[in-house]
């Protein structure tokens, strides 16, 4: 079963438990483990790669390249398989340099202002790391770096902007914030790709 189906099942079980919202994240993690450890086991891809092929990137909290034998093609196959977004669309938005994902579209396509562009960068970059590299979370520093590269970084409002992000959890102590998966991550990612590509899709 693909990892996103395991995660959806785990989230459904978490909601059924009727627990207070502030412990949903912990309960969700335990549910994933009890349902077969989907969060700690990389799924096989259409290329037939072994589940452990992305193990080196598993606990990444900042950009971390998977093993050298993992090709760019395999990363796009994994990303396509897990998100349901076609390869050609993914290649219109992402590139992989030394197996680390980056965003290839101009910042003006990511939103009408820096706040919207920053949230787009965060969602896209998280999904590339989570689904292609199988990283459980992404550091906010990685998002900051990509925003600087795309010239949409707003230092004064960066944290406040990410607090309003949809599709990923913005969590962690001050100064060590990270992005993590939510049940609606794939849906929001698909919507974002459609908006960015517009008529090109």
Image: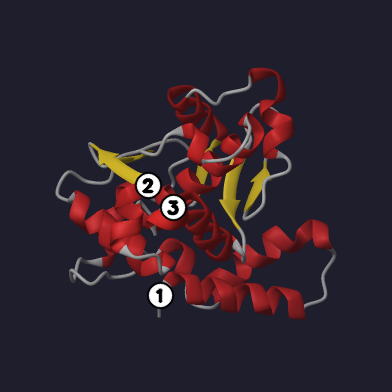
Dot 3: element: helix
Q: Tag 2 or tag 1, which sits nearer the N-term? A: 1
Q: Residue at x 27, y 46 (%)?
A: 66
Mark 2 to mark 3: distance in Å? 8 Å
Counting from the top left corner in percent of width and height, residue 182 is at: 62, 60
Counting from the top left corner in percent of width and height, residue 9 is at: 58, 79
Residue carrying label 2: 93
Asked which quadrant contains residue 1, the reply is: bottom left
Mark 1 to mark 3: distance in Å? 26 Å
**Residue situated in front as seen by the camera: 47 or 86:** 86
Q: Tag 3 or tag 2, which sits nearer the N-term? A: 2
**How dense is the environment of label 3, judged by Cα within 10 Å: few (below 14), some, or many (20 and up)?**
some
* Residue 135 shows in this picture: no
Q: Residue furthest left?
A: 69
Q: Are marks 2 and 3 in contact (CB under 8 Å)?
A: yes
Q: Tag 3 or tag 1, which sits nearer the N-term? A: 1
Q: Residue at x 67, y 46 (%)?
A: 165
**Residue situated in front as seen by the camera: 139 or 79:** 79
Mark 1 to mark 2: distance in Å? 23 Å
**Residue situated in front as seen by the camera: 169 or 198:** 198
Q: Quadrant of the C terminus?
A: bottom left
Q: Nearer the viewer, mark 2 or mark 3?
A: 3
Counting from the top left corner in percent of width and height, residue 131 is at: 41, 57
Q: Nearer the viewer, mark 1 or mark 2?
A: 2
Q: Residue at x 53, y 54 (%)?
A: 195
Residue carrying label 1: 2
Which label is found at residue 197? 3
């Amino acid at each position: 079963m693909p990892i996103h189906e395991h995660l959806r099942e785990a989230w459904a079980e978490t909601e059924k438990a009727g627990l207070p919202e502030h412990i949903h994240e912990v309960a969700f993690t335990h549910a994933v483990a009890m349902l077969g450890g989907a969060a700690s086991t990389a799924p096989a891809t259409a290329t037939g790669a072994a589940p452990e092929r992305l193990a080196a990137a598993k606990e990444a909290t900042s950009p971390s390249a998977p093993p050298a034998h993992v090709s760019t093609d395999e990363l796009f196959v994994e990303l396509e398989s897990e998100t349901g977004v076609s390869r050609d669309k993914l290649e219109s938005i992402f590139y992989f340099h030394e197996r680390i994902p980056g965003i290839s579209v101009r910042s003006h396509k990511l939103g009408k202002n820096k706040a919207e562009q920053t949230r787009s960068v965060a969602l896209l970059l998280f999904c590339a790391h989570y689904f292609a590299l199988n990283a459980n979370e992404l550091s906010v520093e990685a998002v900051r770096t990509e925003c600087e590269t795309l010239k949409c970084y707003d230092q004064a409002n960066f944290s406040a902007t990410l607090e309003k992000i949809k599709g990923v959890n913005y969590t962690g102590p001050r100064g060590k914030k990270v992005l993590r998966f939510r049940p609606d991550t794939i849906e929001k990612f698909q919507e974002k790709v459609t908006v960015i590509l517009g008529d090109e899709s």
